[in-house]
Amino acid sequence: MPAELGELTALKLLDLADNRLTSVPAALGGLTALTGLYLDGNQLTSVSASLGALTALETLWLDRNQLTSVPAALGGLTALTVLQLDRNQLTSVPAAFGGLAALTVLDLDGNKLTSLPAEFGRLTALTSLELQGNQLTSLPAALGGLTALTGLRLGGNQLTSLPTELGRLAVLEVLHLGGNQLTSVPAELGNLAALTSLELHGNRLTSVPASLGRLTALTGLRLSGNQLTSVPATWKEGGALAWNVCDIDLDVNGMLTQTRGDDDCAALRAWRAKCPELRELWDESEPMTAWQGIAFGEAGGADEGRVVGPGGYCSPSHPMHREPSFLEILEIIAISMTWRTMGARPSVVVNVDLQTRGLTGDVPAELGRLTALTGLYLHGNQLTSVPAAGAYTHSSTSQLNLSHW
């Protein structure tokens, strides 16, 4: 990129996304009128501290690069409202980011963060904080000061506890904590009166506080994949949490008989929590039968391996998809409606076909739970590792294609 770009002092928007840039000239710091800078989807390993001089900048996209750090000088961008840093290699973020007084959206999904600076608590304009798929083990109590926050997503980290101060987020609507290592959650979460979606699946919870029954705005509560043996009686006996309004997912807990299908669903959700591309591909509001690339079959008997998902119709001996017949489509619709309205557990996963989907990161060991799997197709992605061969010891996988990453 020529340094002469820095002479375009009247420039307001510069879009260089999805190229092969490995660096940007420090001269870009001279674009004092710039309000939007898009450098996402390149091969940047660093950015110049001179970008901190872009005092008019409102939007900065640096996602999908190879950044291992970002300069503290970016904390001086006082007009910035949107900062996209997801899908990089960041292990930390500068405490100076606490000075981004106008920031409303901060996306740090898919990095390698192990902690957050307490200064994040000064981001009082922030409405959305995305931290899924990192390596966070704890959160600063100062996050309780994010009084404008409506969405906080922390799925796929290594959190073992939560600060009680999260209960002060009065306008929070979405709190996603699935795929962590939580053994308990603070009772103060029951103070989140605006909360509509709470995800706690895939943790190590043995109990949940009765105070969650006060969440009258809640429409979705996911508790699957924990170690619960009961839920508070007040939830069912006149509690504010209306079971006929709130979709409560309790699969794969001690209170229910665990099935192979339960394990399969938990494995897919664990992968989704860790992979940003799957979070885009698989819509949580849809039943798993609608998830692209996943084929379900009946567990046990002659029908095991018969696909009932809408992505195609196949069998273990013929794993390549074909268009389902009219009768098969009716079967798919009936099963999807039953699972959505009756809460029945889906059957087992028999085929995973996610070829050329741009998937990044690691394939989680949880895929070894897919004991009825007969085909696994992952070639043409950007995956960095797969579980050791022993992870599939108990699987019936007969077709495994992981080539050409």
Image (cartoon, rainbow, N blue to C red):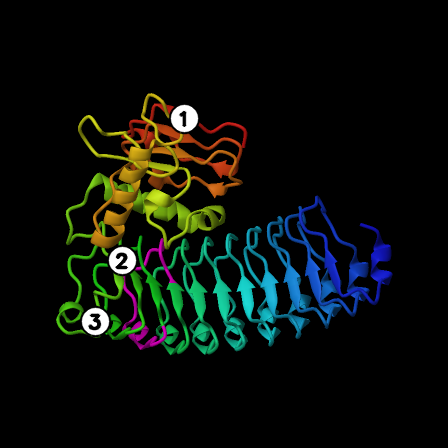
Can you give x and y, in whole percent of width and height, for residue 15 in the image? 72, 55
* Residue shown at the point (23%, 34%) measured from the top left: 298
- Asked if residue 152 shows in the view, the reply is yes
* Residue shown at the point (84%, 51%) measured from the top left: 2
**Dot 1 amino acid type:** Met
Q: Dot 3 corresponds to which residue?
A: 210
**Dot 3 amino acid type:** Ala
Task: Give the quadrant of residue 86.
Answer: bottom right
Can you give x and y, in whole percent of width and height, for residue 145 in the image? 46, 78
Q: Dot 1 corresponds to which residue?
A: 320
The segment highlighted magenta reads 176-194
- Residue 98, numbered label: none
Q: Dot 2 corresponds to which residue?
A: 223
Q: Residues within 10 Å of mark 1 (few under 14, many from 20)?
A: few
In the drawing, does residue 240 fall left or right of residue 360?
left
**Dot 2 amino acid type:** Leu
The answer to whether 396 is drawn above or below residue 363 in the figure is: above
Q: Disc 2, disc 1: CB below 8 Å?
A: no
- Asked if residue 161 shows in the view, the reply is no
Name the N-terminal-most of marks 2 and 1.
2
Task: Give the quadrant of residue 193.
Answer: bottom left
The answer to whether 12 is drawn above or below residue 272 in the figure is: below
* Residue shown at the point (22%, 29%) measured from the top left: 303
Task: Give the quadrant of residue 97.
Answer: bottom right
Kindly report the distance in space between the C-alpha atoms of the residues bearing marks 3 and 2.
Answer: 14 Å
Can you give x and y, in whole percent of width and height, for residue 222 in the image? 29, 58
Q: Residues within 10 Å of mark 2 (few under 14, many from 20)?
A: many
The overriding secondary structure of the stretch rendered in magenta is loop
